[in-house]
Amino acid sequence: MIAGFAHGGLLDRAIEVCKEMVTVGRPKPDAGTMATILPATENTASENITFIKKVFDDMPKKGLISWNAMICVEEAYGFIIRMPVEPYERVWGALLGACQVHSDMEIGLIAADNLFKLVPTQSGYYVLLSNIYAKAGRWGEVMSVRRVMLSKGIKKVPGDTSHPQSEKIYEKLEALFGRMKDLGSVAATDDVEEEDKEGHLSVHSEKLAIAFVLINTRPGTPIRIAMNLRMCGDCHHAAKLISIDHH
C-alpha cells in the first residue's frame, strides 16, 4: 500500500499508512518499509522526515539493507558515517547516484573517493562523478576524470550485454527510439556530458526493462516497471511515449 501511494504521488497517504503500522504495532516497519516509504519523503513536510528517521532509529535490527535504503533521505552522508558496519560498494554507489540527482558535488566527491578505493576499475562510478561535474559546468574537472580513466585503461561501458536476450533487447530498444524520434521526442540531457547524452540515457535500466517485457509478452499486456531509485526525466518521458504508441 505504501509503495502504491508513493508511486501514485499520494505522499501524505503513504506516510499515514506507515504511521498506522507504528500505532497498531503489526506488521512492524522493517527494511522493506523503509525502501518503499523513502520516495514519499523527498518533497514532504519536515515533521514527516523526522517521523521516518524515528521509525528507522526504533527498528530492532539495522542490517545492510536498512542502512542502504536510508541513504535516500536528506542527511544520507550522516547516516553512512554512523553505520555500525563498514559501508560497502552499493551504499557508496547509491549515495553517489543521489548526489548526481541533487547536484551535491561536495558529498559526491567523498562518495566517489571511497568507491575508487573499493572498486578502482568500475567505469560507471567515474561516469557518475563526471556527470556531476558536467551538471555544474565544471568542464575542467570532467576532463580530469577522463584523463584518470584513460591512464588506468578504463573504458565506458555502453550497456550491459550479459543477459542471454541482450541482442534482441537492444534491437527492440533501437526500434523504440526510432519510433520516439518519429513522434518528435528529444532526449532530456541536461545532466550528462555532451558526447554521452543520448547513448548514456538510452541504456538506463527502465528502458531496458521495458524493451525486455515487450519482446516477451503479447501485444496489449499491461507493463509495470518499478525501481527503488528516482526515475530520470528522460526515462519518464520515454515511458509515456512508448505507452501511447503501444496502447
Image (spheres, helix red, strand yellow):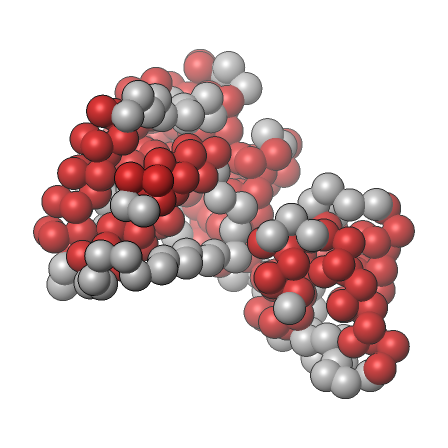
Is 140 on the left or on the right of 10, as rendered? left
Q: Position of residue 81 (x, y in %)?
A: 69, 55
Nearest to the observer: residue 9 or residue 74: 9
Q: Is 109 rendered above or below residue 15? A: above
Determine the residue positioned at 47% across, 56% down: 227
Q: Position of residue 171 (x, y in %)?
A: 12, 44
Q: Is residue 98 visible?
A: yes
Determine the residue positioned at 47% across, 26% down: 191
Determine the residue positioned at 18% across, 57% down: 215
Q: Position of residue 102 (x, y in %)?
A: 61, 34
Quarter residue 111 falls in: top right
Determine the residue positioned at 72% across, 60% down: 14
Q: Residue furthest bottom?
A: 26
Q: Is 49 rendered above or below residue 84? A: above
Is 184 on the left or on the right of 37, as rendered? left
Nearest to the observer: residue 202 or residue 6: 6
The quadrant the N terminus occupies is bottom right
How many callouts does the rendering have? 0
Nearest to the observer: residue 123 or residue 18: 18
Q: Is 1 rendered above or below residue 191? A: below
Nearest to the observer: residue 184 or residue 82: 184
Q: Position of residue 216 (x, y in %)?
A: 20, 63
Q: Is residue 129 visible?
A: no
